[in-house]
Amino acid sequence: MIRPRSLGVLVLVTLIVGSLPSSVATGTVMAAPTAPLTNTAHLDFLRVQVTPPQQPGHTTYQIAARPSVGELWTYSAPGPNGTWSRLGGGAYDPATDTWEQGAFNADDVSRAAVVYLRHWRQTGSAASRYAAFELLRGLTYMQTVTGLNRGNVVLWMQPDGTLNASPVPVEPPDPSDSGPSYWLARTIWALGEGCAAFRDTDPSFAAFLRRRMELAVDAVERQVLGRYGTYQIIDGRRTPAWLIVDGADATAEAVLGLAAYVRAGGSDRARTVMRQLAEGIAQMSGGNARHWPFGAVRPWALSRSVWHAWASQMPAALARAGTQLHAPSLIGPAVEDAAVFTPWLMTSGGPDNGRQPTADDRNQIAYGVDSRVQSLLAVAEATGRAGFRRLAGMTAAWFFGANAAGVRAYDPAAGTTVDTIEANGTVNRNSGAESTIHALLTMLVLDANPDIAAVARTAGIVERVGTTTVEAEAGRLADGATVVTPSSSWTGEAAWSGAAYASVPAGGRVSWRLAASDQARLVLPVVDLQSGNGAATVWMSGERSLGRVRSGDIGPQGASPAPGALLPVALPAVLPAAATRLSTRGTRGTTSVDAVMLEPMVSRLLLGAGAHGTALLRSAAQSPRRVAVAVPGSGPSVTEVYDAAGRLRARYDDPGDDVSAPVLPSGFTVIRR
């Protein structure tokens, strides 16, 4: 998708083999004790002090007395004998000691400051207090304090402290401080937590951070909230027009900072801005256990088809803001995301980089995993419902081996974290700032919550039974149906699954032979819906009718980047258990069928390590079900049954190996051994 993403996903690092720049340090990260889990050693290695030259519109706290500021290298790659190289973004020019983008970026500096702030407050570490102080000084130096762009933030800085407002490639806005941005939102996150942390221990610095926070809040008011209460039409759906860069994801990270700031005595204006932004996020919620997006809070206002795990802290933001404002209307969508969407996500493959709407990008990164953990914890704290803590532990198990590679993604002895685990098990062993940051944020949660940590350590994936996707072009095409391979799999607001689709004219047919299942399944054809399109298809399993899809069942394009939308459409009838035949026939016009999503009535995820195991059952059924589960491990087990709002409805002890567990409609059940 073409929009600003996490730096670890979007930016490619160019490394000139055999010619590392003088500004790129190499060294061995010293091992730390394995307990507690949080080890800042690698993040410390990436941190550096820089003395920037004088630059108009940029200064920071006590710059005359303390001319150097804290910054953070963006990437790091492993070398021989346990060494690591620190790298910037883009190609490196040794003649000028500069990178196409820069060495340090505000996105990572802000989030690293949050790590150190939380570590200091949780453990009392003086070293983390100092690191947070210096990184906040470096971050505020990157904030523009005068002129039309006041309050905004320059994204990139070169090794000598020179700001690079227009990097290569350009990432909007350009210059990077010329408008609202992800890095403005993340700066607000760090400033809010900084104000709260330093309020009592360093009132002078806290007052400086407060002034910078108010400057950032002013930028949001000026550039974003002038549209508060207005809407844009996105493929027939009224969508809030006052989100930062049209993103509930970016907006959520700003709201996290605003919530911390307001809780620590922030201004009435900040409280109002927090409420207005949170209201916009809440309106991005949709679907239910049987219909896309399955109760999720969507991240991007301009698409009804997209969800991604990275930066998916929308429920966390709603829970924090809702608690501060005593607003159940904000907490409600966060609960639905946690109780309905998250179990679907976990049983269907986990925190992927892209559900657009099929799982076309199944790469997984620490940012995505941590965003889910933080959201589940925040909702658990807002509601007091323990089931969300169980889900947080199962999500965090990714770091301990519950991933496609079956490896530890985080090394507590060194504080390093792999950058990516691909769906095929390939592991990117780099450990950049973003991955390190978000692993540490999760480890802080685990260190502070032993019950969540205990679940996280039942780490290996034993079984996963959830969504399966059948490609339309993989079926048997007949009577004029053809395979179309578009020039790009990206439509502008969604992605064609498998980079192709089936064009089904009136009379055209596509049929599939499916693997048998021991339970009924929902059938959700993914169809390119186009306003005014009169096309239709009927769907069958053998002689059994499952329903009809009308391609015009969507509103006008409005402000969306492309006409129409790729969306899963739930058929009214289910595919019976043991059924292996599925077909569609065009009855009018021409329908573009991308894929078919098959959803079992009860999906499951089983994790296990040694004598311990954890099972998650998720229901798409409309009535209670009972499911036999062979829970990994040995010894007695505990079954907890939760409804669609995450409320505990029943608890059972079972001494046996196999468990017969109830699952409530749209609810989830957790079994622990």
Image (cartoon, grey):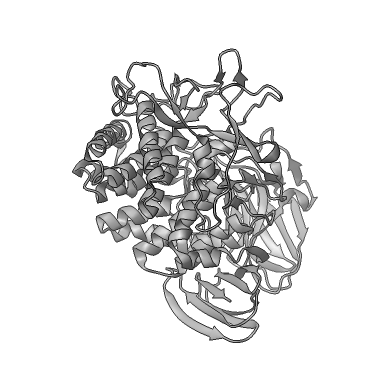
Residue 80 x %, y %: 70, 37
Report the residue at 42% width, 35% height from top.
245
Residue 426 x %, y %: 71, 47
Total marks placed:
0
In this view, 503 is above or below 460: above
In the rendered image, is residue 308 in sight?
no
Nearest the eye: 453 or 30? 30
Q: Is residue 21 left or right of residue 477?
A: left
**Viewport quadrant of the C terminus:** bottom right
Q: Is residue 177 left or right of residue 599?
A: left
Report the residue at 51% width, 63% height from top.
453
Residue 112 x %, y %: 45, 41
Quarter of image, res 186: top left
Which residue is outermost to the top?
95
Which residue is outermost to the bottom?
655
Report the residue at 53% width, 79% height from top.
639
